[in-house]
Image (cartoon, rainbow, N blue to C red):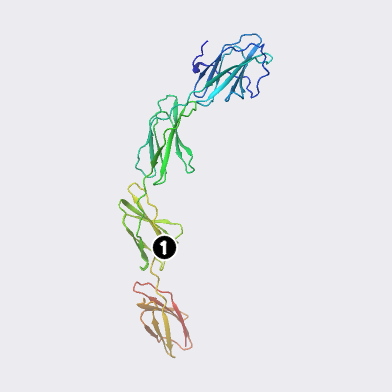
Amino acid sequence: MKIGLLTSLILLVITGCTTNPPLKSNPNVPKVTELRTLSDRNSIGLEWDIVNKPEIAGYYIQRSSDARKYKTVAKIDNRYISHWVDRNLKPNKTYYYKISTYTTKGVPSFAIFKQVKTLPTIEAVPFIKNDNLKVKGMIKIIFRPHPNERVKGYYIQRINNSGKWETIAKIEPRLSAEYIDKGLEDGKLYRYRVIAYTWDGLKSYPSRVISAQTLQRPQVVLNISATINKPHEIDLQWQAIKGSVEYKIYYASSEDGRYSLLATTKNNFYVDKISKNGYKRFYKITSVDKYGVESIPSQAVMGSTMPAPVSPIVSITQDSNSVTFLLTSPDKRAVKYLIKKDDGKRIINIHNVHSSYVDKDVLKSHSYLYKIYAIDKNGLVSKPKEVEVSF
């Protein structure tokens, strides 16, 4: 009897399967005279002529991968069965089989031997390439559908940071032929391959490996300047980058601090409005191209609003009816002074005082607290200088 196609092989219900060998063989037990095989990529079909003797209960089937150490993979409890399929095998691998009958008392016959090799795994996907997708953080690969109709789909693999292949996607059905990898780093090289898999879980050889790079980052922003002498603002300016469509400005309160987005501009300058005097900020700037790819942040640069003027130096002279103030500016920024006079009941503001001031509105046996502020040409006000005068 010739063996039929695998699709016509009868899958048996196995009554027992053990790793232990059968009992010691008896040469008087009728044995199988011929064993035929048919190979697939991950299975092997066995066929033999039945041994139709009343004392025969069934068959033992043993398998080995090295022709030395065998294990029992099937015990068939019906002597009229003549087919068995060994599944979940490895492609392109040699296996060794023994088949023997056994009696109703479990005594086996001498075995006959057969060497057989599974078919090679299916060939690799025949064509794969990078589609040069001009989109930020994306790479598109396309490939030719596998010609083998047993293919169900594909594993898309990419080398990870540890240098190992990692499956990043599973695509079905067979005629699907592209994959878009998203959320990738800008300006980084990635490596890909495709493995087809069949309906019964068999994998093909890997396709050839392709390399693909995400869009390059724009040039780093250079020559950044930030002012330190303007009231209530910091003016930023930098070298324009060819091909940039906008710039992003980030700031932090310290050079090594956490930077937050402050503004986006199409210009190569920006004015940061700040209400505080002498307030420092650190800035980093990036350029962004037409694809939305952002450059590496620039070196940090420090800017500061103009500090308030220094408190004035105050000299006083007094008599029983008045007090005279002589005022000087240590940093020479003051253009006028403000004096706040506290008589214990109210505060009187004396504006637009210049280098001296005489206060005659005083009472004997009374004390006054004066707070004197320097004011510069920008209207910035110093901390007060306090003077207490008693009559």
Q: Position of residue 178 (x, y in %)?
A: 39, 34
In the displayed structure, 82 sits above or below 71; it is above
In the displayed structure, 53 sits above or below 18; it is above
In the displayed structure, 293 sits above or below 50; it is below
- Quadrant position of residue 170: top left
Residue farthest along the right direction in this orientation: 105
Q: Position of residue 179 (x, y in %)?
A: 40, 36
Number of numbered tags placed on the structure image: 1
The answer to which of 384 and 129 lies nearer the viewer is 129
Circle 1: residue type: Arg
The answer to which of 267 and 318 lies nearer the viewer is 267
In the displayed structure, 294 sits above or below 29; it is below
Residue farthest along the bottom direction in this orientation: 320
The answer to which of 309 and 379 lies nearer the viewer is 309
Q: Position of residue 91 (x, y in %)?
A: 50, 26
Q: Is residue 349 something one can see in this rendering?
A: no
The answer to which of 3 and 14 lies nearer the viewer is 3
Q: Which residue is mark 1?
A: 281
* Horizontal arrangement in the rendering, residue 222 relative to residue 252 (left or right): left
Q: Secondary structure at mark 1?
A: strand
Q: Residues within 10 Å of mark 1 (few under 14, many from 20)?
A: many
Q: Is residue 208 something one can see in this rendering?
A: yes
Q: Position of residue 321 (x, y in %)?
A: 42, 90
